[in-house]
Amino acid sequence: MFAEVVVRSPLHRRVVSSAFDQKSRAGRAVSLQQTFHYSIPSHLQDGVVLGQLVWVPFARRELPGIILAFSESSPVAQTRDILSIIDPRPVLTPYQIELMRWISQYYQAPLHLVAWSMFPSGISWRSATMVYLEEAAASAMSRHPSGGTAWPSKEERLILELLRQRGPMSLAQMQPRLKKTKWRPVLDRMVCKGWVRKQLEVRGPQVKPKTEPIVRLLAIPSDEDMADLSRAPKQRAVLAYLRQRTQEEGCAFPLVISLAELCDQAGVTRSVVRRLAERGLLKLDEREVRRDPLAGREFVTTVPPKFTPDQEVVWQHIANALGSARGQVFLLHGVTGSGKTEIYLRTLAEVLKQGGQGIVLVPEIALTPQTIRRFAARFPRRLAVLHSKLSEGERYDEWRRIREGLADVVIGPRSAIFAPLPRLSLIVLDEEHEWTYKQQDTPRYHARDVAVKLAELTGALVILGSATPDMTSYYRAKRGEYTLLQLPQRIMGHQRSIEEQRIKFHIDNRQEQVKALGPGFEDARYMDLPPVEVVDLRAELRAGNRSIFSRALQRAMRDTLAAGEQVILFLNRRGAATFVMCRDCGHVIKCPRCEVPLTFHHGPPASRQGADSDNLICHHCNFRAPVPSSCPQCSSKRIKFFGVGTQKVEQLVHDLFPQARTLRWDRDVTGKKGAHERILAKFASHQADVLIGTQMIAKGLDLPLVTLVGVVTADTALQLPDFRASERTFQLLTQVAGRAGRSILGGKVIIQTYAPQHLCIQAASHHDYESFYRQEIEFRRQQGYPPCSRLVKLLFTHSSAKTCQEEAQRLQQLLDNRIARLGVPDVDLIGPVPCFIARIRGQYRWQIVMRGPDPTVLLADFPLPLGWRVDVDPVSLL
């Protein structure tokens, strides 16, 4: 028997014979689909299964691999044996193996990178090359320089002294201490001389199950036992406490209690308990403790409300498909507050009733706590959470619960799509339009397309929900590839909840805003979407208002705060100023490693000592520099701050409304674990009046006291040279406008812009997705942009601007020749051109975009030169 194995190794590179210039980097290529065949030794044949982690020999190393298939023959004449099994339980299911191969092929991603992104990396065992001193090293170190050629060199003595002081070390441990020297060839010479020895050693996984010491009381202490301990009062106190616990009503026997709890309750140290164990009166043991990310949270169970007529129509379509669905995809287009989440909940309840399981994806970690509350209230103790802010231990424990079938609902951002649910029946993507569903690092997969493929492999049903669907999803729904379902009305709840809101918010009567749904649904209420006012900032300037807040927005904020209600201010820029410029020579202070201006940030208020704690920060590489007192180019003192960011907005709110309590929600303040949840909880409990944030605040938040949303400037992303700029702006404006009026208090939205007549701003102001789609799809069709065609972006980076440009031009020639040779005139190339940001972290960037019905045909069996990165179906061309 033989096994096909994907090995976790960066050596999946091979030299290929091609027409490339062999003196350049282009003579090497990466084999994306490469796997290796190993023979299965007889003592392992009964234990190996598909998807299992195993140790395999690879070159001169031992590396972990995953079994993808079995066969009775091998494509190569000589094979090596699998060494051992790392984990008897598979880390990948059969359907995940098929999904992994599809992702690798479709997104042109190395198979081994895809494989190891589908489960927690901490469970994979590691190997390390250790370096040991040999006996001959001692005599070598004692020799005098006059001793001849065997005298150790300066570099050799450095390595010998390091090993003598620190003992055996791995190559990884030696690297930071010897990085200023070319020490690896020196080490190899020392091995040949017999001074040191290199040995490959296997280490355990980075993360393991957490355990705690416990005490097992196997027999109830008798009076004789207690009498024998008359001279050991502390031991006697332990037995007395254990006997009392066994007598409590409902106490299981034999009694098991954690050692820490026992010592705390009995008031003794652990040594006292160990002496009792030595006497045989109890037994010390260990048990596994789950690292629960939801520990300590209480969820109040809720009852499903009655559906509205629109919800009932949507539900009937989905319910009919549940019994017969084979990868069917529903696009649920519902305005903000229309009850999409209730559709998810009801569908999931039916799936669980039928013995299935489900995955619920959200675009941001910030939305995870709110989503968890909604789903945990309906399905208590059946949830698992997966996201990058969990500790490695929490992520490992949650993944194991899912694999073992102990959780039926998985909630998380895009990576949760790889949860190994054995009975997957439903996949939900909430806010499916969000670009964060696209993984930006290799493997560059899009969670929406992966979900559709996963449903095809498992027979699961997919629901894509959004108030502003992605153009591609809506296009597919219009063509009949997806089933389009719509919820056009904002639901405010039933009459009882309306009355509760009136009492809570001290409202006498707002019946004119709350409307009945009609016959048969007299108890249900809905409201129109909040009115949107578009303010022309050009007119504000002509009227003499140079503030970033228009007069209309200032009045609305004043009225809202006076009424004790809340305000959200949206601005898609962080910092206090977007760039710093000299007013005499025009010099803009830029990052030395990136072709972008540095952004001015105020230091933390608690530690700020004048301007010294303020910084200029690069948002791409995190380079930081103090604010200059004079221009570094002409020495002028006329340094001016231009542009505005969230910090500046917060400062101006304090100036205008000193009594207003503000919160800022952007990447600068959400780096720590749990930061998103703390900010949201603080604002939801009305501990702040104004929330100022970037695009995080536009996504799915339900805050009933928010009656005013102000978009400080709607033009931030509109003028970017990207084909999705208009769509992205429309989605952001519509979504952030949807945060207002989520209760019977109603709401209002004010959008400030320098382009009030632009299509996307006009459509957003009328909540008119259909109008925007019709005009935007016509533009995409004329220009040959997705969804009317497909794009593949090829990116090359290099520290030399000349090399980067030459390599891009060389690949363009190769691709042009390939287009002519294959006869695919419907595929054309855009570029090569420098990227919008031409340099990041010291690396120059050039790109080529392939456009056509299926541009990936150019990459089939084409050894793409090293250094090029592939992005299939990019969400942006920037």
Image (spheres, helix red, strand yellow):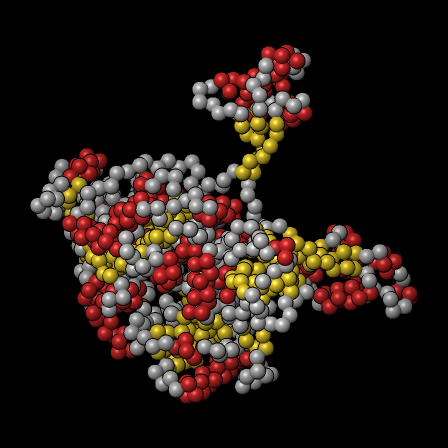
Taking the image as shown, residue 75 lies to the left or right of residue 686, namely right
Q: Give the percent coordinates (x, y) of residue 873.
A: 38, 70
Q: Give the percent coordinates (x, y) of residue 750.
A: 22, 56
Residue lying at 71% horizontally and 66% vertically, measured from the top left: 184
User: Is 713 in front, or is 527?
Assistant: 527
Quadrant assignment for the N terminus = bottom right
Residue lying at 56% horizontally and 46% vertically, measured from the top left: 208
Label count reads: 0
Quadrant assignment for the C terminus = bottom left
Q: Residue furthest left?
A: 519
Residue lying at 79% horizontally and 53% vertically, measured from the top left: 164
Q: Quadrant of residue 159?
A: bottom right
Q: Quadrant of residue 131?
A: bottom right
Q: Give the percent coordinates (x, y) of residue 69.
A: 52, 62
Q: Is any part of residue 869 visible from this angle?
A: yes
Q: Is any part of residue 543 visible from this angle?
A: no
User: Is 320 in front, or is 610?
Assistant: 320
Residue lying at 23% horizontally and 47% vertically, measured from the top left: 742
